[in-house]
């Protein structure tokens, strides 16, 4: 009985850790793609660098928002 | 610039002398306690520890329990928890240590913990008052320049000039570029959103009072901001907007037997502000957690070994400086993203008949 309870706790920790790692992978891939394509665009048109920079940061912030969603779910799995 | 390198060396050397005082503590560091103590709300403001004595600002408690209204100072509660983990106080109230009501004032009625009506001035409320006061000062005082000068006068200088530049940047690049002609109607709300969030974020990163309070990392604060955006968006939505939600321009079988599309659209009305709320809350909470963890890294290393601790100091100080700079950038970006998305939602709600006829 106690071992089952400990197992549930251990599974929660495992789930939270794996979830956090997956969130980082997703955010890294997404924001890396944005950054790469923004670099390409800036290299093609240096006079547009300021416009591109603001839009890149906005898109990165939106993706980061979703990644943080996953972090919150992982924290919920850890502590609740 | 000439003295930069010697100056940095001196700063690092002085900083490595700090943990020598910290190594007096031999037991492990309660990182989780420190973290939650900063992020969560509480009835007193624990500023720092001078030696062994804590410096705490006790805040007023205003509750309506089963015995009526009570107003008293939170210093009336015991400082340390008793055997049950509770901190007893006057009028039969105590601060609970249980899982469900941790850190909240409860009353024991018939063996169950009941929370009274609690409108105390807690730490988050005090931080809100401080941030609001500072925001009003920073915005209304430069606004007096506009009353005394005409449009053609040369631009103001100093702090007034800086605030004018900042506000015009937010107005032109974020609000006008999205809302276009309707910008002046919604600019007061959106500018207030931006500057409130920016100020609250920055004050949360400052490590000492009057800053250092976690306001936007509290989900109720961001919930209210998202609620305001929700109300403004939907109350000012045009009839065409509501028509598109309940009877969208899609094939009939997606609408008639089972209202699939209307249900999805209705769900979308709620998820958009929800995403705003979670994005701001999570970014700020994670930022505070990282800043605290990096600083506590030194003390954790000292718990292992004095040498490991000393070696950790330049690493942790370097990482903390980097994270703090990133934090300030994140504060600005999150305020900007919140305002921009609110502007986008408001502009999306103002759909007009002739625009849909063109497609």
Image: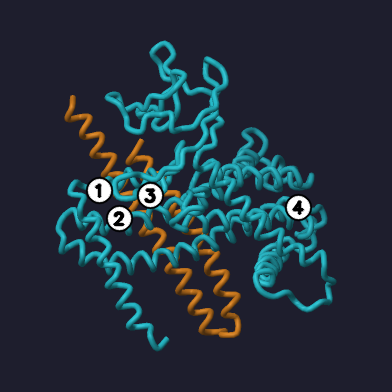
Same chain for mark 4 and mark 1? The answer is yes
**Count of marks placed on residues:** 4
Q: In the rendered structure, which disc, 4 or 2, sits on the residue that comes first in sequence?
A: 2
Q: In the rendered structure, which disc, 4 or 3, sits on the residue that comes first in sequence?
A: 3
* Chain name for mark 1: B
At mark 4, the secondary structure is loop
Rendered shade, chain A: orange
Q: Which residue is located at x 38 percent, y 83 percent? A: B4
Q: In the rendered structure, which disc, 4 or 1, sits on the residue that comes first in sequence?
A: 1
C-alpha separation, residue under disc 2 versus residue under disc 3: 14 Å
The residue identified by callout 3 is B48
Which label lies toward us, 4 or 3? 3
Rendered shade, chain B: cyan
Q: How is the image coloured?
A: by chain
In this view, the residue farthest toward the bottom is: B2
Relative height, residue A54 to residue B359 (above, below): below
The residue identified by callout 1 is B29
Q: In the rendered structure, which disc, 1 or 2, sits on the residue that comes first in sequence?
A: 1
Decide if residue B41 is in sight here.
no
C-alpha separation, residue under disc 1 versus residue under disc 2: 8 Å
C-alpha separation, residue under disc 4 versus residue under disc 1: 54 Å
Q: In the rendered structure, which disc, 1 or 3, sits on the residue that comes first in sequence?
A: 1
C-alpha separation, residue under disc 1 versus residue under disc 3: 16 Å
């Amino acid at each position: 009985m106690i071992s089952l309870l400990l197992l549930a706790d251990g599974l929660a920790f495992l789930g939270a850790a794996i979830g956090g790692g997956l969130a980082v992978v997703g955010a890294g891939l997404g924001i890396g793609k944005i950054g790469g394509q923004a670099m390409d665009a800036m290299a093609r048109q240096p006079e547009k660098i300021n416009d591109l920079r603001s839009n890149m940061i906005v898109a990165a912030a939106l993706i980061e928002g979703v990644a943080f969603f996953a972090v919150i779910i992982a924290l919920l799995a850890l502590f609740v | 610039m000439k003295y930069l390198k010697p100056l940095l060396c001196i700063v690092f050397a002085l900083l490595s002398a700090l943990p020598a005082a910290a190594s007096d503590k031999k037991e492990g560091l309660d990182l989780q306690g420190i973290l939650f103590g900063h992020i969560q709300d509480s009835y007193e403001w624990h500023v720092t520890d001078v030696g062994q004595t804590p410096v705490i600002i006790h805040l007023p408690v205003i509750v309506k329990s089963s015995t009526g209204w009570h107003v008293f100072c939170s210093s009336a509660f015991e400082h340390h928890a008793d055997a049950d983990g509770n901190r007893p106080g006057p009028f039969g109230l105590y601060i609970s240590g249980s899982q469900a009501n941790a850190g909240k004032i409860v009353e024991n009625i018939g063996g169950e913990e009941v929370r009274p009506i609690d409108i105390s001035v807690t730490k988050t409320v005090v931080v809100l008052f401080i941030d609001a006061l500072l925001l009003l000062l920073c915005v209304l005082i430069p606004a007096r320049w506009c009353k005394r000068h005409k449009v053609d006068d040369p631009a103001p200088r100093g702090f007034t000039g800086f605030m004018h530049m900042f506000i015009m940047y937010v107005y032109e690049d974020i609000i006008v570029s999205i809302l276009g002609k309707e910008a002046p109607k919604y600019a007061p709300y959106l500018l207030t959103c931006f500057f409130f969030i920016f100020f609250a974020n920055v004050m949360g990163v400052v490590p000492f009072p009057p800053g250092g309070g976690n306001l936007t990392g509290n989900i109720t604060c961001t919930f209210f901001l998202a609620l305001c955006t929700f109300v403004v968006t939907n109350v000012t939505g045009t009839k065409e907007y509501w028509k598109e939600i309940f009877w969208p321009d899609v094939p009939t079988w997606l609408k008639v037997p089972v209202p699939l599309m209307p249900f999805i659209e209705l769900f979308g009305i709620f998820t958009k502000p929800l995403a705003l709320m979670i994005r701001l809350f999570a970014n700020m909470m994670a930022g505070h957690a990282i800043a605290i963890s990096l600083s506590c890294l030194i003390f954790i290393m000292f718990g292992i070994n004095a040498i490991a601790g000393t070696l950790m100091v330049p690493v942790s100080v370097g990482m903390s400086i980097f994270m703090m700079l990133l934090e300030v950038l994140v504060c600005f970006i999150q305020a900007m993203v919140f305002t921009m998305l609110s502007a986008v939602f408001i502009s999306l709600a103002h759909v007009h008949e002739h625009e849909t006829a063109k497609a």
